[in-house]
Image: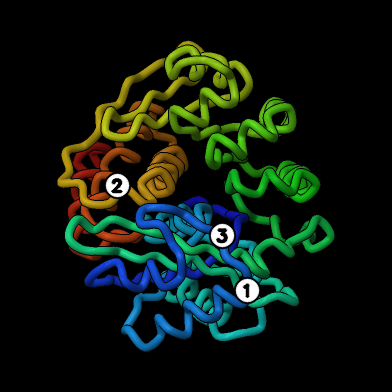
Amino acid sequence: MKSILGIGNALTDILAVLPDDEFLKKYHLPKGSMQHVDEATGDKIWQMLKTMGVQYVPGGSAANTIAGASIFGMESGFIGKVGDDELGSLFKTGQENIGIKPTLLKGTLSSGRAMVFVTAPNAERTFAVYLGAALELVPEDLKPHFFEGYDYFHIEGYLVQNQALVRRAVELAKQAGSIISIDMASYNVVESNKAFLHDIIEDYVDIVFANETEAKALTGKEPREALDEIAAMCKIAVVKLGPDGSMVKCGDEFYKIEAWPAKTIDATGAGDIYAAGFIYAHSLDMPIEICGKVGSIISSKVVEVIGPKVDIPRWKDAKAEIRKLMKI
C-alpha cells in the first residue's frame, strides 16, 4: 500500500449538540454562520463547552483527508502546528489512534480549534473558529526529511494564504518524488491568491480538487469549462458538484460521476473524504472514473452523520461497495 503525507491547519473539532439558540446568542454567534474568534473568546467558549459533554475530533481539511486515507489502509502522516496544551495533545492522540504519524510542531499560541454547534430541530451547524498555533506554521519549520518516503503529498487550500509556506512545501515534496494534490479552500481564498495558485499548479501540482465556486474563482468559468482549464494546468482535475456528483478529467479522458445515494443530514467534510477516496483508488492504479466513484461512495457515507468522520458501520459498508466496484 502506498503512503500519503498531508499539511494543513491542525484544528481540533469540538462538537456540541445544543437544545436551542441560547448559547449562540450569549456569544453573539449568528445561527448557521462561521465566525473567527480571538483567543480569549475561544478559551471562554471551550471552557463552557467542557461542562456539556462534547466530542473531540482532530479536524481541518487536510487532516480529514489524511484520516480517511489512513482508514483506507494507506501509511499516513500529517504536518501541522499546535500549542503546548490539552487540545494539542488531544489532536496528536486522535491522529495516532487511527494510524497517522503526526509531525506536530509547537507554537507559542494555544492550539487551534473549530467549535461546532449543532442546534435543534434541523441540525443546523454554527462555527466559532480560533486558528491559534495553526497559523504559526512557517516555511522554516519544514525539513526535507519530513517528506521522504511518501508517495503522495496533499495540501489544504487554506494554507495558500501563506504563499511562502506552500511554495516551500511543494518544493520539498517534489524533491522527495511525491505525487502532489491540492484541495481548494473557499472561493474568497482562491480569488485573493489566484495568480499564485496558477503558478503552483502548473509547476508542481498533479491532482487538483475544487468545488464549483472554487473552480469558478480560479478560472472565471462555469464547472465544465473550468474543469477543462484546470486539467490543462495539471495531470488530473476534479470539480465536485455536491449533490450532483463530480466531474473528473485527465488528458482527453472525461467522466461525469453521479453522487452515490445518501440520506444527507450534514455535508461537512464530504469534499475532504472524497479526496481521500480518490487518492486511495489512484494509489492502487485504478482508472480515474473508478477513482471518482470511490470518492463518491465514501463521501455519501459522511453526509449521513453529523461531523466530518464516518462511523464504523458506514466504513464497513463503503469498503464492501468499493471492493465490489474495484473487483478486488
Q: Amino acid at mark 1?
A: Glu
Mark found first going from the N terminus, 2 or 3: 3
Q: Amino acid at mark 3?
A: His
53, 301: nearer the viewer: 53
189, 29: nearer the viewer: 29
- In three-dimensional space, the C-alpha distance between marks 2 and 3, rounded to whole angstroms, equals 30 Å
In the picture shown, does residue 312 fall above or below 177? below
- In three-dimensional space, the C-alpha distance between marks 3 and 1, rounded to whole angstroms, equals 10 Å
Crowding at mark 3 (Cα within 10 Å: few <14, some 14-19, many 20+): some
Expressed as whole percent of the image width and height from the top left, the position of residue 241 reads 36, 29
Q: Image point 61% across, 74% down: which residue? A: 111
Left or right relative to 259: residue 78: right
Q: Image point 17% across, 43% down: which residue? A: 262
Q: Residue furthest bottom?
A: 51
Residue 236: in sight, yes or no? yes
Crowding at mark 1 (Cα within 10 Å: few <14, some 14-19, many 20+): some
Label 2, on which residue?
298
- What mark, if any, has residue 39 been given in the picture? 1
Instruction: Say what secondary structure mark 1 lies in.
Output: helix
Q: Residue furthest right?
A: 140
The quarter of the picture where residue 55 lies is: bottom left
Label 3, on which residue?
36
Instruction: Say what secondary structure mark 2 lies in.
Output: helix
Q: Are marks 2 and 1 in contact (CB under 8 Å)?
A: no
Question: What is the count of numbered marks?
Answer: 3
Expressed as whole percent of the image width and height from the top left, the position of residue 186 reads 53, 40
Expressed as whole percent of the image width and height from the top left, the position of residue 160 reads 68, 44
Q: Amino acid at mark 2?
A: Ile
Instruction: Say what secondary structure mark 3 lies in.
Output: strand
Q: Nearer the viewer, mark 2 or mark 3?
A: 3
